[in-house]
Each structure stands twice: as structure tokens, then as C-alpha cells.
């Protein structure tokens, strides 16, 4: 028999549970062809089935050494390391499998389980489960229920998982999870659903509509959906929207998606807001000043700076923020933060004093945010979202200003509210009882899964508590 024939016989015996015969045939295949990676992988799978994990690791190490570009071999090695309770080695093998094939769901799922169960990094596990769900759909949904029941809510992501994947017979087991998801997701989901039905009447442009959806999904824990909406928003714009570009990058990082398709165009557009280069400037000459920006350009310049921050180009970021800091308070916060990071002490002091003086008159950010009223008939539905999002973006700048006001001996005394102490994003919105009833009724009409709709209705009737899950 040839090595191929021995291998095929070994595979047949392995699949039939005849492990001794399978081992004999794999060994004979390797005796004829000792550097055949597929035969080593078959032998490794056999050992794994017999729970001989050390022998499985040895065999998979042979197969990965012989075929370093085969993601399946690295996945098998990762699983064997996991069962041997060698999480660091498993992590490296899973990462190699993912790097070789980002579109396979199983390695992402295994990596998520490893982060949760062995490495104590549940947030990383959530990211991996998101990828597995996106690529493999309901195949790995069970892990999602277990993961999200243990973590702070990711409302829109959880709502979608429950709606699309959870079998009706599972509802009783996960009552607390359902309750928390509905409590956090329903008001904003109902509001957005209402706006979608009324959008044409309200006249909200498509680009702004997709931007609103993207921001809502991003901050409500579903970056994959957010990224899709941001892409559609950019398609509606005549030129690159730098706010959308910035959040495309954020969604990529949260969703473990390569950011290259969005990064280079964003940097190129952001560079348009840098002041002129002073290539031949001498200290006795007057610097060439940048032309003043129009007010409608402030937001783009601000996000140009944030894109440079994320690309670790703080000097460029500071140049963008300084162009508008006198007229656009968020940019002043970001400039202040950049000076802290770049250790520009004199500039930091100047900017800190300017910020406190501005806040004394405007009170825009230092006192925190109260829940924003949402109006079903609003002509500018983006406005309340932007206020909250801007505050979250300024988290580090607000914290630095707090430190400055506390320790630099400034004459003003402020109770500066750090963004990290704010309520969660899903708690920052309020609908009037009448509007909530109208919006929720419309949402229920669109729920195609009758069993899921019954659960939502039970929650709205107050028949679902948020207690412990059933055993």
C-alpha cells in the first residue's frame, strides 16, 4: 500500500472510533513518508480523540513545522494546548491560525473561550465571540449567551443575538439575561426603528441617518453593525466624513477587523487640516499662518486631530486642535491632553487656565451629562447623541483638567465630572411615556420571530424580572 492509502485507511478507522487500527495505519503512512504534514495531523487528531493530549501536541507540532501556513494545523495545536492547560502556548497557536485565515469562525471561537476560561480576559473573549458570530452565525451562539450573561450589557449586540439565535426553549433558562437586554436596548431600539419609518418625512439625509445608526450601534455594543452603517454613510458623502472615518477606525479595533481600508484615506484627508509646513522658516522670519477655518469646518478639523491621536502622531494632532481651540471647546480639551502627553508644561498651563475660564462661562463639560430627552418628531435626531458622544470622547481631557484644577492651585473650584463616572450610554436617553408606547408598538409590529415577540411583550407587561438565571 502507498502512504496515501495507509492515510485514507487510518482516517476511515479514526472516524469509526477504531483508534488502534487508525494509529497503526497513520504510523505506516509516516514510515513511508515521514515529512508528510497531513499524516502527522491525522495522527494528532487520533491522539486528541483518545485524550492523549501530550502525544497530540507532539504530532501537531510536527504538522505545523512541516506546513507553517496551514491554519487548520495551528487550530488543532491550539486546542491540544488548551486541554493540556497550557494557555499561553494555546494563545500563540490560536493567533497564528487566525492570522493565516481571518475568515474562519472556529479559531475565533476557541480564542474567545480561552480568554474567558483560562486567561481571565473576558473583554477580549467578547471581541473574539463577536468575530465568531459574524463569520459562523448561530454555530457558536451558545458561547455568546454564557459570555454576555457574565458581563455588563452590550445592548444592541445582545438584542440581536437573542432575536436571531436563541431557541424558544432557552428563554426560561436566561430570564435575567433577557430582562437586562430588553431594559437596556428597547427604548433606543424603538426610537431608531420609529425614526427609520419616519425618516423620509423628517428629511434626514441618508448619510446622516447611517451615521446616527453607526454611532448608536457602536456605543450600544455592536461594532460589526456599526461598521456596516459607517461604510454606507461614507458612500452617501461627497467627500470623506472625518467623524465617520474616526469611528470606522474605532469599530475596526473593537471588532478585530483590519483598519487598513479606512486608515490611509482618513490620514490623507486629515492632513488637509495641518497648517503649512515651515520648511525654510528661520527664527527671525514670521511663520506662515494657516488660513482661518470656517465654523462648518471645525468638526472635521477636530476629528482630523483625533485620527492623528489614534495613529500616535500627537504633534500633528496638537496642530489640528490648536487651529480651532479658541472657538471649539472640545478641541481645547484635546489640545490640553496632548500637551500633557507631550510634556509641554508651559503650554499645558496656558491651556488649562484657558479651559477653566471658558468653562466658568459656558459650563459645557465639567458638570457631566443628564439623560437627554428624545423626541419622536425631532427634526435633528443626531443632536442629543452628539452631545453624549462628545463627552465620552473627551474622557481623558476631562480627567486631566480635573487633576490640573485640583493640584495646580487654580483660583476656581470645580466639581469636574469625569466621563468614566457618567451613566452608561444606554442610560442617557429618555422618551416620554406616550412616545415610548408609540415607538415600542411599532417595533413589536416588525418583530418576525413570534416567540421572541412574546418575550418582549412579557417584559413590557412587567412579567419578567431580572433575577438569577434558572439552573
Image: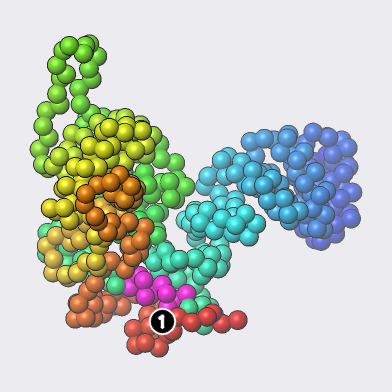
As for residue 375 lying within the magenta part, the answer is no
Q: Can residue 141 be seen in this view?
A: no
Along the horizontal axis of the image, is 14 left or right of 243? right
Q: Residue at x 33, y 65 (%)?
A: 423
Q: Residue at x 22, y 17 (%)?
A: 278
**What residue is shown with label 1?**
455
Q: Is residue 155 visible?
A: yes
For the C terminus, the quadrant is: bottom right
Please rate how many residues cluster around mark 1, counting C-alpha atoms within 10 Å: few if below 14, some from 14 to 19, many from 20: many
Closest to the observer, 201 or 284: 284
Along the horizontal axis of the image, is 238 left or right of 64? left
Q: Residue at x 25, y 52 (%)?
A: 390
- Secondary structure mostly seen in magenta is helix
Closest to the observer, 390 or 18: 390
- The image quadrant that residue 294 belongs to is top left
Percent across and percent down for residue 120 are 60, 57
Span colored in magenta: 177-186
Q: Image height check: is 353 above or below 373?
A: above
Along the horizontal axis of the image, is 105 left or right of 351? right
- The way the protein has been coloured in the rendering is rainbow
Q: Which residue is drawn at 28% across and 56% down?
A: 416
Percent across and percent down for residue 336 are 28, 40
For the N terminus, the quadrant is: top right
Percent across and percent down for residue 459 are 38, 83
Percent across and percent down for residue 99 are 56, 40
Closest to the observer, 132 or 19: 132
Q: What element carries label 1?
A: helix
As for residue 178 lying within the magenta part, the answer is yes
Amino acid at each position: 500500500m502507498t502512504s496515501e492509502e495507509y492515510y485514507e485507511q487510518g482516517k476511515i478507522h479514526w472516524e469509526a472510533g477504531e483508534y488502534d487500527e487508525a494509529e497503526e495505519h497513520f504510523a505506516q503512512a509516516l514510515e513511508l513518508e515521514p515529512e508528510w504534514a497531513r499524516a502527522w495531523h491525522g495522527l494528532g487528531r487520533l491522539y486528541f480523540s483518545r485524550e492523549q493530549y501530550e502525544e497530540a501536541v507532539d504530532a501537531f507540532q510536527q504538522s505545523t513545522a512541516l506546513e507553517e501556513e496551514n491554519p487548520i494545523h495551528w487550530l488543532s495545536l491550539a486546542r491540544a494546548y488548551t486541554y493540556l492547560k497550557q494557555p499561553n502556548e494555546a494563545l500563540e497557536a490560536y493567533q497564528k491560525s487566525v492570522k493565516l485565515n481571518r475568515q474562519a469562525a472556529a479559531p475565533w471561537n476557541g480564542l474567545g473561550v480561552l480568554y474567558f476560561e483560562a486567561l481571565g480576559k473576558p473583554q477580549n473573549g467578547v471581541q473574539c465571540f463577536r468575530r465568531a458570530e459574524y463569520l459562523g452565525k448561530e454555530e457558536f451562539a451558545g458561547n455568546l449567551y454564557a459570555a454576555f450573561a457574565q458581563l455588563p450589557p452590550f445592548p444592541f449586540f445582545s438584542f440581536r443575538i437573542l432575536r436571531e439565535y436563541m431557541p424558544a426553549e432557552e428563554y426560561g433558562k436566561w430570564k435575567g439575561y433577557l430582562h437586562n437586554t430588553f431594559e437596556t436596548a428597547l427604548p433606543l431600539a424603538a426610537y431608531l426603528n420609529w425614526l427609520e419609518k419616519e425618516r423620509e418625512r423628517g428629511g434626514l439625509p441618508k448619510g446622516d441617518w447611517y451615521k446616527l445608526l453607526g454611532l448608536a450601534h457602536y456605543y450600544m455594543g455592536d461594532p460589526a453593525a456599526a461598521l456596516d452603517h459607517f461604510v454606507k454613510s461614507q458612500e452617501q458623502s461627497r467627500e470623506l466624513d472625518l467623524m465617520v472615518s474616526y469611528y470606522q477606525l474605532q469599530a475596526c479595533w473593537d471588532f478585530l477587523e483590519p483598519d487598513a481600508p479606512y486608515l490611509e484615506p482618513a490620514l490623507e484627508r486629515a492632513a488637509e487640516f495641518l497648517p503649512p509646513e515651515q520648511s525654510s522658516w528661520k527664527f527671525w522670519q514670521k511663520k506662515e499662518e494657516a488660513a482661518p477655518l470656517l465654523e462648518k469646518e471645525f468638526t472635521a478639523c477636530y476629528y482630523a486631530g483625533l485620527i492623528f491621536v489614534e495613529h500616535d502622531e500627537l504633534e500633528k494632532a496638537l496642530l489640528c486642535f490648536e487651529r480651532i481651540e479658541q472657538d471649539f471647546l472640545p478641541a481645547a480639551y484635546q489640545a490640553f491632553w496632548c500637551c500633557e502627553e507631550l510634556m509641554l508644561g508651559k503650554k499645558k498651563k496656558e491651556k488649562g487656565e484657558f479651559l477653566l475660564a471658558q468653562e466658568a462661562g459656558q459650563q459645557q463639560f465639567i458638570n457631566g451629562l443628564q439623560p437627554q430627552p428624545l423626541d419622536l418628531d425631532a427634526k435633528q435626531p443626531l443632536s442629543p447623541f452628539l452631545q453624549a458622544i462628545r463627552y465620552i470622547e473627551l474622557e481623558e481631557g476631562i480627567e486631566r483638567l480635573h487633576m490640573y484644577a485640583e493640584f495646580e492651585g487654580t483660583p476656581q473650584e470645580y466639581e469636574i465630572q469625569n466621563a468614566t463616572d457618567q451613566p452608561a450610554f444606554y442610560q442617557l436617553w429618555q422618551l416620554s411615556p406616550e412616545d415610548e408606547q408609540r415607538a415600542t408598538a411599532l417595533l413589536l409590529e416588525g418583530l418576525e420571530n413570534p416567540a421572541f415577540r412574546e418575550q418582549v411583550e412579557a417584559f413590557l407587561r412587567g412579567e419578567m424580572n431580572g433575577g438569577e438565571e434558572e439552573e
